[in-house]
Amino acid sequence: MSLPEDPQAAIARRFIAAIPHSRELGMELEEIGGGVAVISMPYDPRFVGDARTGVIHGGAVSALMDTCSGAAVISHDATPEATATLDLRIDYMRPATPGQRITARATCYHVTRTVAFVRAEAFDDDGDRPVASATGAFTGGSGKETRTSTEALS
Amino acid sequence: MKRPEPVQVIKERRDMGLAKLVGQVPYIGWLGIGFERKGDEVTATLSFAEKVIGNPTLPAIHGGVTAAFLEATATIELAWSMLWDEIESGRIDAAQLTPETMPRLPKTIDITVDYLRPGLPRDAYARARVVRSGRRYASVQVEAWQDNRDRLFAAATGHFLMPEPEG
């Protein structure tokens, strides 16, 4: 029998499985816990951004980065069970190679009373050269007064 | 004096150019984004559907979908502004455009998205503005709203690498 899953990781895993858009993109949770998440996405011709090159659209990579970053936040010990993106900056370093899976790794590296900060990178089969990197700020910090829903900004 | 072109001919030429441009991006169709044109101004619509949901309990549009919607709108606006000049000057005949002869799309260098409000379960709209378009780089701002044009739910600034001249 396998060891019981860390409760925070279990919450994060259920959270990802319940996101319709992540399911549509075929995202799979590879690793989760302690403020770190790894999520991958298959190559799919429907997600191509330029028919002439067959390269995946930046938007699909953004969706992967955003999901992975959010998962990293909720897997952090000090954060509530839900979060929303405040801002996300994505740098595209090179086109992802057509046909290859894209894997994102996000780390929630700092949590204040109200905000969680995240860094993420995405790779195709070449694990040495990132396809894209991202930095973001998310709602929900360690404080008791922290609002826990994505309605925090409304 | 040269007679002005019939209005229908002008409209068909421009709509055809825009449709062929958007047709270059399979992901835009898959996500359910459509583009409407008034003169050279383009407005994007993201149709609400189950697959764009990020938070099923609210429900709310996925932050990644919002980012994708803004990036797609910015890219199309930038490419369209270049294609518009080519078509209107007569250097490119929209009717003859094929995926092979379509000018190359600009590539995203970076994009920063501000999430201002949750994306509600209904259609969303976006318009982009090319702030600066040089020979190599372009800077584009884009805004998205739902019910009220003045109540933005997201905005973004992106930098793009212009396609190299072909030949």
Image (spheres, helix red, strand yellow):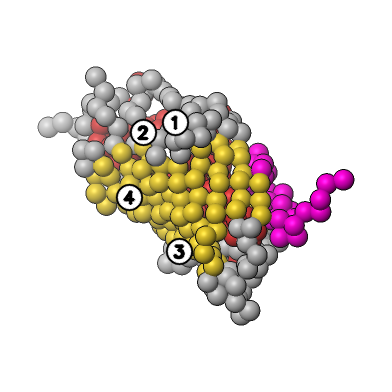
Q: CA distance from mark 1 to mark 3?
A: 28 Å
Dot 4 amino acid type: Val
Q: CA distance from mark 4 to mark 3?
A: 17 Å
Look at mark 3 in the image and give the residue it sits on: B152
- Tag 3, which secondary structure? strand
Q: Percent x, y for residue A79?
A: 62, 67
Say which of marks 4 and 3 sits in front. Answer: 4
Look at mark 1 in the image and give the residue it sits on: A50
Have a look at marks 1 and 4 and say if they share a chain.
no
Dot 1 amino acid type: Asp
Say which of marks 2 and 3 sits in front. Answer: 2
Have a look at marks 1 and 3 and say if they share a chain.
no
Asked whether the residues under the numbered discs 1 and 4 touch, taking CB atoms below 8 Å apart as contact, a structural biologist would say no
Q: Residue furthest bottom?
A: A145
Asked whether the residues under the numbered discs 2 and 1 touch, taking CB atoms below 8 Å apart as contact, a structural biologist would say yes
Asked whether B94 or A136 is in front, the reply is A136
Look at mark 2 in the image and give the residue it sits on: B105
Q: Residue at x 48, y 58 (%)?
A: A136
Mark 4 Cα-neighbour bin, 10 Å: few <14, some 14–19, many ≥20? many
Task: Give the magenta-colored segment's residue range.
Answer: A1-30
Q: Residue at x 26, y 42 (%)?
A: B137
- Tag 4, which secondary structure? strand
- Badge 4: chain ID: B
Mark 3 Cα-neighbour bin, 10 Å: few <14, some 14–19, many ≥20? many
Q: Residue at x 24, y 19 (%)?
A: B167
Q: How many numbered tags mark residues here?
A: 4
Whether residue B90 is situated above or below residue B74 in the rendered picture: above
